[in-house]
Image (tube, rainbow, N blue to C red):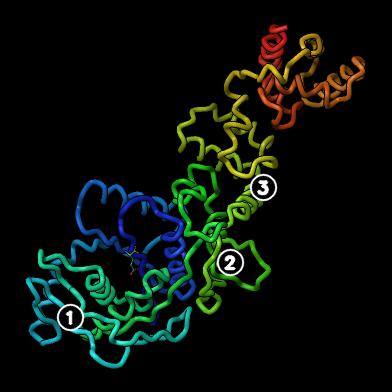
């Protein structure tokens, strides 16, 4: 029977790295096995915040290509059913009323155990389990009751989730037994820590999918990186496309140890992915990101600038700072121009009559200029670069000048030289 798994986020905000990691491992398991991946929102009210957070979570999953099967379900829609089940358990003597709440009896003796697909045998002595509040006095079912009820209703065969939930599992097993429901398999994934060994948080950098998207990470690279947190194929291979992951993923190769989120490694992977794109794919990814972020830069110019930056930046988010000078006038740091007025004026006059105005001729003429002035090329190019691009670091100077065009280049050289 093909497995049915679920991702069951609580809609409290943006989708966090830990959450999306759980979602990914569930999705990979389902897709590898030809099963189903369900999305269940564990909401306890219907506020606007919940609606927004749910939409955000779905948008993040869509961006990463983690498609779910069937309709999204909402925990709140099953509250009545949960209460009915709790009342049934009271009628059957498996639960009882206690100051208005309903509690399910936990065994007094023995233990509750399961074979965790990631961690092996786990056994919890019964003395650790208090009778579980299933429905609170105000009528609201608890998480530890609603969640297994829903797993049962949805025919969930494998519960794959973070290790934070290990302590809930014996209670949920007892709930399912009381309900007369079949038990799913359980697999508890390791936590994700920051480079300092503390739980991943804002202090470490971006932590939500949305933040990585805004920072210009490429979805397939982030997906690839997330898969490596706790899963490995052969301890060597690091680049896996979505299809590779689906083909190769198994729970046997998921480890129980915590993983460290290594931002440098992600950046490295992201750069590899971006550089491996065809020029057209790269330009499309860049345009899509710029549009999302609200930049209204000329599309044709973005496409022409794309090949000049593809080898040089590791995230799309670096583009505005690195190549924004193609779209907006620049204000170079005067320290970068210091004493270079005559050189800039000379560069202006050399470029004014250059025909045709292409990068090769621009390069030739500026090299000659440096030689005439007795300067090393780098010395001469630095102020020119600053005048034209506004910065010490830029895409190739000659290609940039060609793309900016004669008129704009001369205007910028004039403006920069004018200060001296
Ligand atoms: N809503 C729970 C959470 O976000 C998930 C519980 C589960 O997977 O059983 O941590």
Q: Residues within 10 Å of mark 3 (few under 14, many from 20)?
A: some
Q: Quadrant of residue 243?
A: bottom right
Sequence order check: which comes first, mark 3 or mark 2?
2
Picture quarter with ligand 1: bottom left
Image point 12% across, 71% down: which residue? 83
- Mark number displayed over residue 104: 1
The residue identified by callout 3 is 275
User: For this rendering, which residue is in front, 127 or 206?
Assistant: 127
Q: Quadrant of residue 284?
A: top right
Sequence order check: which comes first, mark 3 or mark 1?
1
Q: Is residue 276 left or right of residue 27?
A: right
Relative to 151, residue 63 above or below: above
- Which quadrant is home to the C terminus? top right
In the image, the residue with mark 3 has its CB under 8 Å from the nearest atom of ligand 1: no
Q: Tell me if label 1 and label 2 are in contact, CB under 8 Å.
A: no
Indicate the position of residue 169 as horizontal and vertical percent values: 33, 77
The residue identified by callout 2 is 244
Image point 26% across, 83% down: which residue? 174
Q: Nearer the viewer, mark 1 or mark 2?
A: 1
Q: Dot 2: what SS?
A: helix
Q: Tell me if label 3 and label 2 are in contact, CB under 8 Å.
A: no
User: For this rendering, which residue is in front, 131 or 141?
Assistant: 131
> How many marks do you count on the picture?
3
Sequence order check: which comes first, mark 1 or mark 2?
1
Q: Dot 3: what SS?
A: helix
Q: Is residue 312 left or right of residue 368?
A: left
Image point 8% across, 77% down: which residue? 97
């Amino acid at each position: 029977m093909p497995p049915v798994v679920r991702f069951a986020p609580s809609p409290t905000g943006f989708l966090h790295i830990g959450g999306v990691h759980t979602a990914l491992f569930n999705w990979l398991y389902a897709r590898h096995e030809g099963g189903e991946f369900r999305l269940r929102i564990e909401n306890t009210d219907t506020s606007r915040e919940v609606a927004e957070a749910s939409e955000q979570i779905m948008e993040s999953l869509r961006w990463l290509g983690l498609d779910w099967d069937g309709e999204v379900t909402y925990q709140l829609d099953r509250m009545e059913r949960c209460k009915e089940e709790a009342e049934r358990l009271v009628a059957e003597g498996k639960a009882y009323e206690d100051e208005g709440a309903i509690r399910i009896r936990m065994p007094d003796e023995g233990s509750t155990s399961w074979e965790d697909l990631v961690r092996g045998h786990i056994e919890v002595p019964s003395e650790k389990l208090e009778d579980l509040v299933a429905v609170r006095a105000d009528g609201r079912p608890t998480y530890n009751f609603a969640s297994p009820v829903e797993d049962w209703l949805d025919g969930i065969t494998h519960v794959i989730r973070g290790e934070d939930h290990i302590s809930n599992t014996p209670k949920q097993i007892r709930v399912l037994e009381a309900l007369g429901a079949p038990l799913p398999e359980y697999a508890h994934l390791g936590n994700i820590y920051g480079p300092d060994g503390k739980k991943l948080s804002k202090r470490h950098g971006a932590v939500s999918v949305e933040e990585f998207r805004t920072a210009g990470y490429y979805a397939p690279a982030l997906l690839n990186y997330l898969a490596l947190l706790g899963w490995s194929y052969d301890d060597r291979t690091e680049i896996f496309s979505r299809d590779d992951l689906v083909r190769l993923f198994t729970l046997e190769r998921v480890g129980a140890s915590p993983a460290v989120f290594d931002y440098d490694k992600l950046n490295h992977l992201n750069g590899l992915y971006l550089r491996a794109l065809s020029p057209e794919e790269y330009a499309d990814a860049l345009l899509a990101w710029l549009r999302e972020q609200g930049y209204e830069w000329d599309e044709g110019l973005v496409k022409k600038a794309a090949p000049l930056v593809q080898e040089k930046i590791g995230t799309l988010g670096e583009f505005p700072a690195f190549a924004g000078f193609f779209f907006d006038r620049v204000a170079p740091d005067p320290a970068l121009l210091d004493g270079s007025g005559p050189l800039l004026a000379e560069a202006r006059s050399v470029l004014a009559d250059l025909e045709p105005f292409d990068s090769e001729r621009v390069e030739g003429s500026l090299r000659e200029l440096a030689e005439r002035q007795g300067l090393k090329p780098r010395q001469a190019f630095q102020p020119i670069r600053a005048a034209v691009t506004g910065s010490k670091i830029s895409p190739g100077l000659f290609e940039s000048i060609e793309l900016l065009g004669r008129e704009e280049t001369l205007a910028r050289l004039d403006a920069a030289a004018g200060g001296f």
